[in-house]
Amino acid sequence: MKNFGLIGAAGYIAPRHLKAIKETNNQLLCALDNFDSVGIMDSYFPEAHFFVEFERFDRHIEKLKRNGQFLDYISICTPNYLHDAHIRMALRAGADAICEKPLVLNPWNIDALQEIEAQYNKRIHTILQLRLHPSIIQLKQQINAQQSKTKHEVDLTYITSRGKWYDISWKGDAEKSGGVATNIGVHFFDMLSWIFGAVQDIETHVHEKHKAAGYLEFENARVRWFLSIDAQDLPEDIKQKQQRTYRSITVDGQELEFSNGFTDLHTVSYQEILKGNGFPIAEAKNSIDIIHTIRNQKATTHFEKHPFVQ
């Protein structure tokens, strides 16, 4: 049984990490969040110590050490712009870090983390759960088996409606979240580079507060992509069903069905990490490069736009 700490216990993604720690038969010793709406902890680890001040959390970890209890892992579920600072804290505390996406916002942050990882002889694990989705694994196997001489044509569409709260929260602040392409797109960009190889061209067509779209060319694919948190962008048939999320990937005109199977992927991620098969920080670099370019690129139109843009 491994000992865990967790930073960001009140966040949206924290319950998936709590569930993963529980389902892998490990224990949470302590958790931290500035906000105290963490009643969800009762469903998993009611005996875990909880703190709203970083200093007391840090002091508690030192107390655990003096009593012979060491944290093996610290899970990080905090706002994107705080990830690298909390990763460094975890390593200094003598624990490996398990960090939500995006690992960092800028490519040079990865270089700095690799240095501190070597300094403390600890590991940083990033959550890239789409690589563990059965449908995505099957697609990668199919693409590898085909060895096509022409590039695949891919359309990626992801609309996940958000209410007015989004703009008020840290997610609506591009300085903290990286913007919508980063916040909801980084996993898809990682998935695309994992399946289709190194990125060769990046063009941004739309980059607004609530939506982004563009073109990506990989070694083995040309991709038109569209991401949005605006419910008005949902297809009419989805609106009529009163659904608030639409997720679609087509490869050479064939729809990839992967709507289900997401809820347990964090547990699978933890299982792989505990077996020594987690994704190291170098695996995140391609997607971080992509989102950094999109975030800082002026909108242009040389390549074909996604149908939802037109």
Image: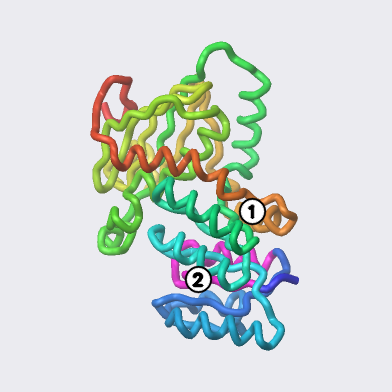
User: As drawn, is 23 to the left or to the right of 169?
Assistant: right
Residue at x 30% of width, y 63% of height? 169
x and y percentages locating residue 266 in the rendered image: 60, 56
The number of callouts visible is 2
Q: Is residue 171 above or below residue 22?
A: above
Q: Quadrant of residue 78?
A: bottom left
Please name the residue shown 51% across and 69% down the image.
89
* Residue type of the residue flagged with mark 1: Ser
Decide if residue 126 is in sight here. yes
At horizontal 54% and vertical 59% (from top left) the residue drawn is 116
Disc ID at residue 269 = 1
- Write down the residue under mark 2: 7
> Which tag, 2 or 1, sits closer to the chain's start?
2
- Measuring from the top left, give residue 248's x and y in whole percent: 46, 35
Q: Residues within 10 Å of mark 1 (few under 14, many from 20)?
A: many
The span shown in magenta is: 4-23
- Looking at the picture, the colour scheme in use is rainbow
Residue 249, magenta (yes or no):
no
* The stretch drawn in magenta includes residue 18: yes
Is 174 situated above or below 214?
below
Task: Assess whether mark 1 and mark 2 are in contact (beta carbons under 8 angstroms).
Answer: no
Q: Tell me if mark 2 has few (under 14), some (14-19) or many (20+) residues whose alpha carbon lies within 10 angstroms of its own.
A: many
Cα separation between marks 2 and 1? 18 Å
Quarter where residue 237 is shown: top left
